[in-house]
Image (cartoon, rainbow, N blue to C red):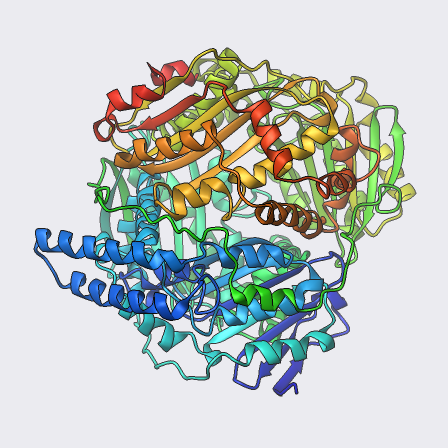
Amino acid sequence: MMMITGCTGILSAQIPNSLRVQEYTLSNGLTVWLNEDHTQPKVFGAVVVKAGSKDCPNTGIAHYFEHMMFKGTDKIGTTDYEAEKVLLDSIAIKYDELAVTKDLKLRSVIQREINEMSVRASEYVIPNEFDRLISCFGGTKLNAGTSYDYTVYFNTFSPQYFSQWAEINSERLINPVFRLFQSELETVYEEKNMYSDMIGSQAIEKLTERYFYPHPYAYPIIGSTENLKNPRLSEMQKFFETYYVASNMGLVLSGDFDTNAVLPILESSFSRIRRGDIPKREAVVLPSFKGKEKIKIKVPIPFVKAMALGFRGVPANHKDQVALNIAVSLLNNSNGTGYLDKLTVKHKVMASMALNQSMNEAGILGVLVIPKLLVQSYSAAEKLVWKEINRIKSGEFSDETFQSLKLEQKREYDAALEDISARAQTMMRIYSQGKSWTDYLEEIARIDALTKEDVIAVANKYFNENYLFVTKKTGKYPKESLKKPDYTPVVPKNKDAVSDYVKQLQDMPVEKVKPRLLDFDKDVTVQQINPLVSLYVSPNPVNNIFSLHLIYGIGSLERPELTQLVNYLHFLGTDSLSFDDFRNQLQTLGSTLSFDVKDNDFSVRITGFDANLKETLSLAGDFLRHAKADNKKLSQIVDEAKVMQKAFYKSSDNLAKALLEKVIYGENSRFLTKLSLSQIKKLKGQELLDMFDEVRQVECSMHYCGSQPINDVALLIKENLPIEEVSKHSKYPYYRETKSYDEQMVYFMDMPDVSQSIVYGYVPGDVLKDRSARHVARLFNGYFGGDMSSLMFQEIREFRSFAYRVNSRFNMPPSISSDKPANFVTMLSTQGDKTLDAITVLDSLIKKMPERPESRVNAVKQSILNYVNNEYPSFREISPRIYVSQRNGFNIDPNKDLLADIENMHMEDITRFYQKYIEGRPVVYVVVGNSKHIDMKKLASFGTIVKVKRKDIYK
């Protein structure tokens, strides 16, 4: 019997059904938020626990625990829990002993004892069974995240598996088991190493510590290196028992379900979670800064200055939050009309932006500034910033500007609720902050009630004389590296076994439901408004916001200069309107105009309210026809290019991608065909606008989503946008010749400062001549390196902890270019001294791919089916998705043939594919890492080493 102790529903006539959230409380005190929406054939499900890193400061326990929640329970992931438990209890005792042991030799002895017991315990483990269960029963995008305030576990799933999803996810929370902890510990080390290699990450950590101390927000979510070395499973168990109780949890579900039908399912499953009250913890009140408190932080990028002004902000739920949002939007907003935006546009500083973020117990309010390169001092830049802040504090903004920013805020609120996944993310955040959905809707409503005086008051209150003044100095912080463990990797022998619990789930009835596919004739209306211009129209069932997306068939591969053009266009006005006037008019309408470029496309995106569609298109059309060159704005483009180059060289990820491009495409690498800094310096504004004219001559598709009929939209487009210019066919897809190799090679770039190595493997491929081969490739991708159950994830990360990130993909050209060759690329990132170990395992998988039972292949097939169903596009994405398919030669949803083909495929098909296209071919490795941590002679055993310098791969 369903037992509901309380029920409140939001049944406002002003909002569509898909935005209504009904709130319930289960019999054990667990909160449930249900948002029924049938626009997509999926459900987004999440469990939110109001416990995060602030509840275990600097220990990393909340984050560790999040990782361990994927390891299963006393029923999931084990062949014999009673036997396994004896060993796991002993391991937990040993970790407590290790935590208090300082002697290095004795620590080594304890770690070996832990390793021996871990190897024995692994004899009972069924690895990744939880992930496989989620996939088996319709799930995709399984993930979790730990923040300061809360932890969330979520995935998307197909609606017919609602009962199984509820059963699995509630079972997960009843008795989680901390198995395979020793290897997961190493994985968390890898994660910390990854963060430490990111540019500025250590500087942000230092700044966060100074800004928030003595609040627990001062400490990194992942924990300190010292605490990571000394984890206590007993403390993790205590954390679970304290915070993972029903009254401290929320269940958030958004999607294709019937509320009345699922409530009994949720009651019978999630009410099993134990009751309990969490201990009351007094929030730490942050002290005010005392005047202008100065600190310096180190960032390893020379020549570039950076500064920040940090004020005390407001926590979530604070009465001043809505007004402060408007005050900050006066400094920065989506149209670039804010006072700080204009400092950047007019090149008075190189970049400036305001930051306003609210956590549960404190808020961050700050201004980040990059002064002009070399010539501008910190004091000069700060004076400019304060001048703009003081304009808000003195009320120096018009009523028209104020009203337009309120309109923008409402549009952004509405846009965040448009589709199931985005709405669920908002629901999770709102629940974690202790709000009800009613509170959130009232927050939106409060925007209308705001007065100009409210904004002036909060600006004066929070942008005061007490602030943290942060400046950057060139330098780096020492990294706390962890040595590779010398213990035996755990390789469970039951990797393909199935627990009794799975058999129980398989007996649960499931309604057979065919995945929803796109109907090219019914889901969009298409009108040819010019021989080379197609208008696609799809309805917006949720709100009154329109979008018009213009996609021209030319991109940065064909014209690398388009990257600079995109940046430049955002700084311009027209022949008749200055930048300020043009952008202010857009903002008054509640509209936006933005530009983007990708490999094969140049995009113009126009958004706004349908009531203002005509006026918005008139403004946008004026810009497209009459954008006015301004050479003064080019200095901003040049300075940005300088900074990007400096930052690029400091990122091992960036350099590895550039090196991989060089290996695959040679001199056609995008990093070598791009404009050099000297070429960017020579650009003229009119040259870029001439290029913009050329772009607008190329074949174009237009995608309108809104409430207007197609004929009305077509007429407005013809009247306002320069479609008469479109006269050239697109060269899509722009093809670059790939390189072939006759022998094994290792291209190596030395980066002395990094903790991790980035490793790519490249196998040149052949042409996939038929549809079936392309579909087997999809199956192979899932099997080899696609998810948590793939060969790469299990063999490299899960069993041996040799990497944090692992993936692979057999890359195929678009089907319209099926006469071009494919290729196979693998990727992993690993601690420097594990590089050879990781490559050894990867190389063995590529050279002799293991064959798993048919059940594993069936799981991959199910994953593809899940993906097809759960990735059915939201209403704004339907039109572009259909266009892409048609562009690639399909006249029906390509997923129809994919699902039909893979249904009859088996392990033998994957094996034949592997043997034909990968086995026996030379592998070319790309390694970017610290040569001091790598035995280069042993690395040479994987191929002839070619040492590469930065100038060889980046122009």
Instruction: Give above or below for 249 relative to 766.
Output: below
Residue 269 position by quadrant: bottom right
Is residue 444 in sight in this rendering? no
Q: Is residue 375 left or right of residue 113?
A: right
Position in image of residue 81 (x %, y %): 40, 68
Q: Of 910 and 790, which appears nearest the observer?
A: 910
Q: Is residue 873 left or right of residue 299?
A: right
Position in image of residue 659 (x %, y %): 42, 21
Q: Is residue 319 left or right of residue 876?
A: left
> Which residue extends farthest right?
711
Instruction: Give above or below for 236 relative to 748.
Output: below
Q: Is residue 812 left or right of residue 47?
A: right
Q: Of 423 and 95, which appears nearest the observer?
A: 95
Position in image of residue 800 (x %, y %): 35, 44
Q: Residue at x 43, y 69 (%)?
A: 74
Q: Of 390 and 611, which appears nearest the observer?
A: 611
Total marks placed: 0
Q: Residue at x 35, y 39 (%)?
A: 198
Q: Of 802 and 61, which appears nearest the observer?
A: 802
Q: Residue at x 64, y 24 (%)?
A: 555
Name the quadrant of the C terminus: top left
Position in image of residue 445 (x %, y %): 64, 69
Name the quadrant of the N terminus: bottom right
Is residue 927 in sight in this rendering? yes
Residue 287 position by quadrant: bottom left
